[in-house]
């Protein structure tokens, strides 16, 4: 149960004064549904305003505060267009205060003609007139806000204004309870950090980074602590020791020798599986490093030991592909493998369910459908989760919680994240790294081409297809609402279809599963030669005959993501090419990113560089959020503070693993505050 002291923070935003449906909606859009969320909605930046007495002293583009007296209200005669209030400073200069839409109603009331007001906003010019569009503040003289010239600027959504959000934050702060301290006192003293409540208050008012650091640290500490609790809980659980006799593995006829990294990882897994406590291991390996075979060997150990194994894939496409791979590799072993997805219905589904229940099916591959309550296993002892980064810890725990004995878990990820982030995301697991590629992989010839040469690129794709080879064409996003500069996959598809007809297929996340699968299948069997796609193909698709990849607006992608995408080619024996299409202007960081893509194919190196470049503070375009499990902590803060927070968490666990002492109590509050409830739940003996 959540500690009562947090109740006020977890109340819905409705409980604020002045929040009706009209405000709730835009708040919702920002993910602010509870008091706590508003409290942790920290300013994006601060503006510093300058108080001036005359417009003559102010520059265009400057944030100013000055006294103005309205002299005339001007409404556009057509009833459309902006509402302008002409106002005069003390030296008689005129400035327009301009309002659009519904805001004009408030302008009427706020700015009566002849009455002096203090106005704060950004000065600019409209034609030959000075103006301030939607002033941030309009106040009668003597207001307290005037003294506060540095102000927070919050992320907004349509329907919210800065003063509105600031007022809500103010209310949230008023409701913040004093909370007991969870940070080690010596750590607090060393960093000079204030209490949590003080830090949150100040973080909304001051640019001093210490306040934000403290809050980021809190979030990191909560995460590390929760992961360590999961780990401790796992150690105490009863698993099922699995010792295979090697009989089935001996019958495998792999078309290649294993790499040393694969052999080492399999050895580590084999060791884990023999233990009483369930395995909790992450297999980290770059795209194409050969994780599937490692998973296969692990699953065979389970089957040899008379148990069942399940392989969970994040998408149906991937589940189907894994199934095909496993089925053909398993043929000589005699192991029975089935595919189960949400789409399987009727008799086929019934017979798979029966097989799993009576144990005649020893391995199952599927989407999360394999963990529905209707699916019963005779003896499920190993769960392999592919592309683990698509699943959260909480989700994984739910899977592990099925059955009396906890199955062994092998999580696999192709995201070669930097070591610091590995700790943040997977701190509760043991890690095996496939840091070596199978031999004979050819370097992918990577080139950067400007978008202007689109026609040439299409011709090149045509020649490639005419030579009997296949290609991918990646577009940034489908039906993106903001900005028309994003090439929509659908529009691009329509264009290439005119040129290539049925040889081109389209796949994106909003397609019906049947259509998506049909398209994928046509491409996988070689009937279709060009696959136009959004980033859905990022995850695990394996078509070795595909040797060309075009990525449009490559500058919008992060390094790690580009690397993931590029990993789709260069899988066969033919030489592969990757064309990175770029827009006309590039930021320094984007330029560096594309250059790195040309220079190296080492995923771990690119991941470290990605972190370095993004730590530099550039806000990247699409899909960068969700890379880390944090809302407050920035990459820079993670790099700097996570090791400290992790040590702090470890120390706390050593001293008070049950979180029963005073600091343990405080730590529980911390876990709830940052929504690591699943960490606390570990304490109930699971
Ligand atoms: P990923 O780690 O991305 O899941 P896969 O398991 O799909 O990689 O393997 C990529 C390709 O490499 C597959 O075609 C697989 O058959 C092949 N492969 C795996 N291990 C080896 C190896 N030791 N030697 C040669 N090829 C291998
Ligand atoms: Mg894979």
Image (cartoon, rainbow, N blue to C red):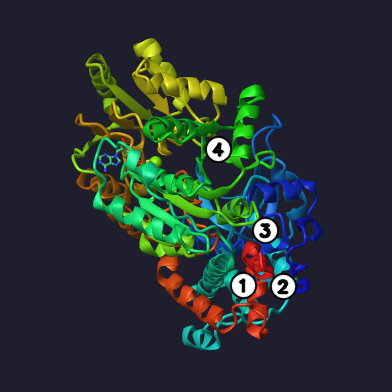
Which of the two discs, 2 and 3, sits closer to the camera?
A: 2
CA–CA distance in space, label 1 to label 3:
15 Å
Callout 2 crowding tier (Cα within 10 Å): few <14, some 14–19, many ≥20: many
Is residue 143 positioned above or below 557 on the image? below
Q: Is residue 664 left or right of residue 613?
A: right
Front residue of this view, candidates 304 and 161? 304
Residue behind mark 4: 367
Element type where label 2 sits in the image: loop
Question: Which residue: 40% across, 43% down?
Answer: 296
Question: Which residue: 54% across, 34% down?
Answer: 481
Mark 1 and 2 residues: CB-CB less than 8 Å, in contact? yes
Q: Quadrant of the C terminus?
A: bottom right
Callout 4 crowding tier (Cα within 10 Å): few <14, some 14–19, many ≥20: many
CA–CA distance in space, label 1 to label 4:
41 Å
Which of the two discs, 1 and 3, sits closer to the camera?
A: 1
Pinpoint residue 9: horizontal percent, then vertical percent.
Answer: 73, 66
Residue behind mark 1: 200
Q: Quadrant of the N terminus?
A: bottom right
Counting residues from the start of the chain, the first of labels 2 and 4 encountered is 2
Question: Which residue: 53% across, 21% down?
Answer: 515
Element type where label 3 sits in the image: helix
Residue behind mark 3: 165
Counting residues from the start of the chain, the first of labels 1 and 3 encountered is 3
Counting residues from the start of the chain, the first of labels 1 and 2 encountered is 2
Mark 2 and 3 residues: CB-CB less than 8 Å, in contact? no
Residue behind mark 2: 176
Pinpoint residue 414: horizontal percent, then vertical percent.
Answer: 39, 47
Mark 4 close to ligand 2, CB under 8 Å:
no
CA–CA distance in space, label 3 to label 4:
41 Å
């Amino acid at each position: 149960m959540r500690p009562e002291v947090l109740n006020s923070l977890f109340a819905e935003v409705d409980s604020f004064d002045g929040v009706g449906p009209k405000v709730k909606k835009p708040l919702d859009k920002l993910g602010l549904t509870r008091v706590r969320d508003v409290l942790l909605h920290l300013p994006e930046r601060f503006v510093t305003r300058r108080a001036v007495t005359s417009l003559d002293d102010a520059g265009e583009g400057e944030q100013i505060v000055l006294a103005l007296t309205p002299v005339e209200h001007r409404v556009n005669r057509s009833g459309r267009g902006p509402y302008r209030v002409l106002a005069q400073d003390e030296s008689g200069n005129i400035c327009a205060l301009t309002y659009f839409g519904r805001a004009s109603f408030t302008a009427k009331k706020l700015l009566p003609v002849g009455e002096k007001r203090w106005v704060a906003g950004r000065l600019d010019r409209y034609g030959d007139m000075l103006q301030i569009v939607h002033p941030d503040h309009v106040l009668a003289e003597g207001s307290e806000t005037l003294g506060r010239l540095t102000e927070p600027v919050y992320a907004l959504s349509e329907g919210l204004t800065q003063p509105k959000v600031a007022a809500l934050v103010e209310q949230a702060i008023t409701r913040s309870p004093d909370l007991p301290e969870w940070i080690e006192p010596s750590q607090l003293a060393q960093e000079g950090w204030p209490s949590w409540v003080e830090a949150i208050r100040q973080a909304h008012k001051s640019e001093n980074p210490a306040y934000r650091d403290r809050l980021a640290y809190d979030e990191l500490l909560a995460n590390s602590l929760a992961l360590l609790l999961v780990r401790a809980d796992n150690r105490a659980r009863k698993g099922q020791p699995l010792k295979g006799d090697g009989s089935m593995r001996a019958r495998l006829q792999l078309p290649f020798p294993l790499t040393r990294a694969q052999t080492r990882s399999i050895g580590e897994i084999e060791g884990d599986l023999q233990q009483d406590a369930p395995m909790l291991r992450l297999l980290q390996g770059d795209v194409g490093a050969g994780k599937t075979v490692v998973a296969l060997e692990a699953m065979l150990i389970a089957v040899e030991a008379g148990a069942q194994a399940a392989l969970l894939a994040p998408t149906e496409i991937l589940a189907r592909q894994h199934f095909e791979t496993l089925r053909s590799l398993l043929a000589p072993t005699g192991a029975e493998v089935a595919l189960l997805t949400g789409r399987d219905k009727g008799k086929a589904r019934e017979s798979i369910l029966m097989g799993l229940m009576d144990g005649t099916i020893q391995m199952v591959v599927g989407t999360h459908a394999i963990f529905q309550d209707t699916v019963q296993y005779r003896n499920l002892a190993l769960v392999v989760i592919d592309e683990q980064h698509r699943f959260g810890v909480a989700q994984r725990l739910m899977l592990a919680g099925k059955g009396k004995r906890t199955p062994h878990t092998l999580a696999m990820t192709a995201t070669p994240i930097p070591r610091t982030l590995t700790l943040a995301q997977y701190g509760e697991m043991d890690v095996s790294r496939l840091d070596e590629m199978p031999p004979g992989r050819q370097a992918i010839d990577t080139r950067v081409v400007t978008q202007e040469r689109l026609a040439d690129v299409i011709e090149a794709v045509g020649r490639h297809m005419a030579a009997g080879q296949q290609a991918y064409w990646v577009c940034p996003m489908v039906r993106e609402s903001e900005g028309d500069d994003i090439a929509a996959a659908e529009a691009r598809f329509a264009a290439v279809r005119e040129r290539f007809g049925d040889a081109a297929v389209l796949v994106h996340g909003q397609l019906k599963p049947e259509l998506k699968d049909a398209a994928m299948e046509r491409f996988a069997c070689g009937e279709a030669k060009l696959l136009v796609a959004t980033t859905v193909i990022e995850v695990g698709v394996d078509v070795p005959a595909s040797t060309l990849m075009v990525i449009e607006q490559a500058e919008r992608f992060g390094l790690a993501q580009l690397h993931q995408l590029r990993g789709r080619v260069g899988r066969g024996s033919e030489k592969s090419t990757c064309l990175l299409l770029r827009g006309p202007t590039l930021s320094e960081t984007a330029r560096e990113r594309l250059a790195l893509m040309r220079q190296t194919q080492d995923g771990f190196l690119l991941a470290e560089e990605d972190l370095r470049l993004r730590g530099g503070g550039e806000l990247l375009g699409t899909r960068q959020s969700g890379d880390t499990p944090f809302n407050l902590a920035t990459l820079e803060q993670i790099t700097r503070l996570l090791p400290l927070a992790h040590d702090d968490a470890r120390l706390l666990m050593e001293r008070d693993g049950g979180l029963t002492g005073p600091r343990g109590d405080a730590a529980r509050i911390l876990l709830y505050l940052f929504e690591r409830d699943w960490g606390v739940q570990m304490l109930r003996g699971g």
